[in-house]
Image (cartoon, rainbow, N blue to C red):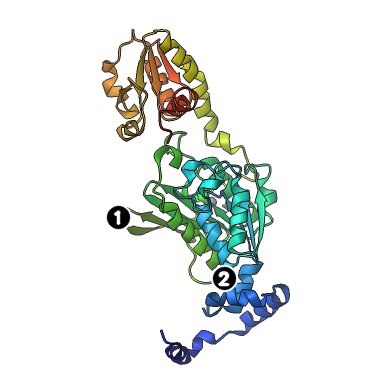
Amino acid sequence: MQKGVARQIFAALPHLYQRDNNIEVTQKDLEKQVEISPREYRRYGRHLIIPEVGMEGQRKLKAARVLVIGTGGLGAPSSLYLAAAGVGTLGLIDFDVVDETNLHRQILYTEKDVGKSKVMTAKARLLEANPNIKINTYEERLTSENALEIFREYDIIVDGTDNFPTRYLTNDACVMLGKPNVYASIFRFEGQVTVFDANRGPCYRCLYPKPPPPGLVPSCAEGGVLGVLPGLIGLIQATETIKLILGKGDPLIGRLLVFDALGMKFEELRIRKNPKCPLCSPNPGITALIDYEQFCGIGEKDRLSREVASVTPKILKEEMSNGKKITLIDVREPHEYEIARIEGAKLLPLGELPERVNELDTADELVMYCHTGARSARATQFLRGLGFRKVRNLEGGIDAWSIEVDPSVPRY
Ligand SMILES: [Zn+2]
């Protein structure tokens, strides 16, 4: 558009520049506290000319303190855009290092970062994008012991985690401190995003009072995720965060936005505050942070893996080399079998095991395996329950087999 034409349009819309007295007061207060340097004027120029942002909004952004939990699929794009937009203080919490399997979606990291600390790599990258902001890093697990102390330092929490214990922990800590929680989850082609703010709407426990049984809902590591999906969903989180800071527009409070990439559709579900919510109702049953691993039954899943009869990849290899006759059963899905398999294994997906169990012989030495050992532990337990005495689980699955025994088997 020609500059002259733009000026004419703006001249015709004088209301865009009107400000009421209340905003003027806020603006004066902000002006005293937050200084925008001449270089920042230029950097944020395209923000400053939006009436809903302007100098006042840019000062609000600079004064804001946002904590991003997890610098993975969701945290990478959201933190990058929040940094670029000029959010003055960003906190990053993640205990992990960059892995090759992160690179198809976690766009903060490059090939040369594999093996390095995520938060430190992210900090360097974000400061390259915008050196005018401050970044605090927490290279640790978020726990019931440190959550309240860390959250207290921030105005808004952005939940980019991929597991249920951390989601409940984040929610509970946010409700207890009265902070908004910009929530999202992703799986394969679908994403969900909302804003939980118990002062104005429901919390995560209003929507999901109880966690799903352990192992029922697969993680992205187990079930996969389309690389671009966390980009889309993470940027909706960044957008909602910026709107909350500016105090503009309609936040996703009480609305769950469900995105389907295959259908390319957004659906909106109303979510209501549960008057009997154990956390955010007037008389809550939960008043302190709890053991979230136990609450989500994580210990149960580990216990099962520990308790079933098992064999390590090295010992299995020795037994096979010594001529012991072993029947290997692969309980993964056919498309996983396509990626990689152990030579000679029979494919029998876990879901089909009950109806195809007659294909197995109780007299055979059976070793069950999957990707990392959890599904095959369930298969082993199932067969033991049916009277199979010679069945064992391959510890760590085909992934451990590739690392410890046969590197020619691709890891994924
Ligand atoms: Zn609630």
Q: Which x, y percent locates residue 99? A: 52, 41
Q: Which x, y percent locates residue 153? A: 69, 56
| Mark found first going from the N terminus, 2 or 1 | 2
Q: Which x, y percent locates residue 86? A: 60, 67
> What is the crowding at mark 1: few (fewer than 14 residues within 10 Å), some, or many (at least 20)?
few
> What is the crowding at mark 2: few (fewer than 14 residues within 10 Å), some, or many (at least 20)?
some
Viewer can see residue 378 = yes
Q: Quadrant of residue 62?
A: bottom right
Residue 246, labelled with which disc? 2
Q: Quadrant of residue 17?
A: bottom right
Q: Residue at x 42, y 11 (%)?
A: 321
Of the pair 342 and 96, the residue shown nearer to us: 342
SS at mark 1?
loop
> What quarter of the picture does the N terminus occupy?
bottom left
Tell me: 13 left or right of 125. left
| Residue at mark 1 | 263
Q: Which x, y percent locates residue 64? A: 64, 65
Queried on whether the Cβ of the residue with tag 2 lies below 8 angstroms from ligand 1, the answer reads no
Q: Is residue 82 above or below residue 397?
A: below
Residue 354, labelled with which disc? none
Of the pair 56 and 290, the residue shown nearer to us: 56
Q: CA distance from mark 2 to mark 1?
A: 32 Å
Amino acid type at mark 2: Leu
> What quarter of the picture does the C terminus occupy?
top left
Amino acid type at mark 1: Gly
* Number of marks drawn: 2
Q: Is residue 50 above or below residue 230?
A: below
